[in-house]
């Protein structure tokens, strides 16, 4: 008996988003390594935590597809972009990535409405809210860097920004603490 309650199109869209979230995790990990290498350990730590959060989002998609009787497909993950030239490019890249992800989330919401797949529509509302938070967070990074002086910021301003991000609350669980019920 076929127990899959997702259309083929929806299963593919959700699998694609699962892979997109993993790609986002790699992008933020890459940016974090870049920041760490430049001596911005606070910014790096912030980006590493964000990378973990994106991985957790991927697991949410995986678990949902499995719970609906589907089988998510893991695809090859594209390489992250080249290292940013500076913090402005790094934070702009984070923002652009989040806006792109929001667009992809909205496409799945649209598809769920077209198919009258109310379970998926309901599931996606968490991600709609999450993307509001993610875009706001990315915009705040850009704003904080502008206040610090942007690309012309003093070492003292960048030190303060780095320290501020180092002290940001760490509400992302570690990978080893993830479970099927709590990804």
Image (spheres, rainbow, N blue to C red):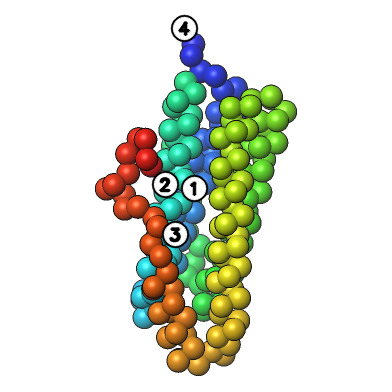
C-alpha separation, residue under disc 1 versus residue under disc 3:
11 Å
**Image location of residue 148, percent across then percent down:** 55, 85
Among numbered discs 3 and 4, the one appearing first in the sequence: 4
Q: Can residue 8 be seen in this view?
A: no
Earlier-in-chain disc, 2 versus 1:
1
Disc 4 target residue: 1
Query: Which of pointers 4 and 2 lies earlier in the amino acid sequence?
Result: 4
Q: Are marks 3 and 4 in contact (CB under 8 Å)?
A: no
Q: Name the residue under label 1.
A: 21
Q: Residues within 10 Å of mark 2 (few under 14, many from 20)?
A: many
The residue tagged 3 is: 50
Q: Compute the Cα span from label 3 to label 4.
A: 40 Å
- Contact between labelled residues 1 and 2, with CB atoms less than 8 Å apart: no
Compute the Cα span from label 4 to label 2.
Answer: 31 Å
The C terminus appears in which quarter of the rendering?
top left
Going 70% across and 30% down the picture, which residue do you hit? 113
- Dividing the picture into quadrants, the one containing residue 141 is bottom right
In front of the other: 182 or 35: 182
Residue 12, numbered label: none
For residue 14, side relative to residue 163 (left or right): right
Label 2, on which residue? 56
């Amino acid at each position: 008996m076929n127990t899959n309650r997702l259309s083929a199109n929806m299963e593919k869209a959700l699998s694609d988003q699962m892979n997109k979230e993993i790609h986002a995790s790699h992008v933020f990990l890459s940016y974090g390594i870049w920041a760490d290498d430049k001596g911005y350990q606070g910014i790096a730590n912030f980006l590493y935590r964000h990378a973990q959060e994106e991985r957790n989002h991927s697991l949410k998609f995986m678990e949902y597809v499995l719970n609906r009787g589907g089988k998510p497909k893991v695809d090859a993950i594209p390489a992250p972009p080249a290292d940013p030239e500076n913090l402005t490019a790094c934070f702009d890249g984070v923002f652009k990535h989040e806006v792109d992800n929001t667009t992809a989330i909205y496409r799945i919401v649209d598809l769920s409405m077209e198919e009258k797949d109310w379970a998926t529509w309901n599931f996606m509302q968490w991600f709609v809210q999450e993307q509001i938070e993610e875009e706001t967070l990315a915009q705040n990074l850009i704003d904080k860097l502008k206040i610090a002086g942007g690309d012309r910021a003093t070492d003292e301003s960048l030190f303060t920004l780095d320290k501020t991000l180092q002290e940001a609350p760490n509400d992302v669980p570690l990978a080893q603490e993830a479970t099927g019920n709590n990804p």
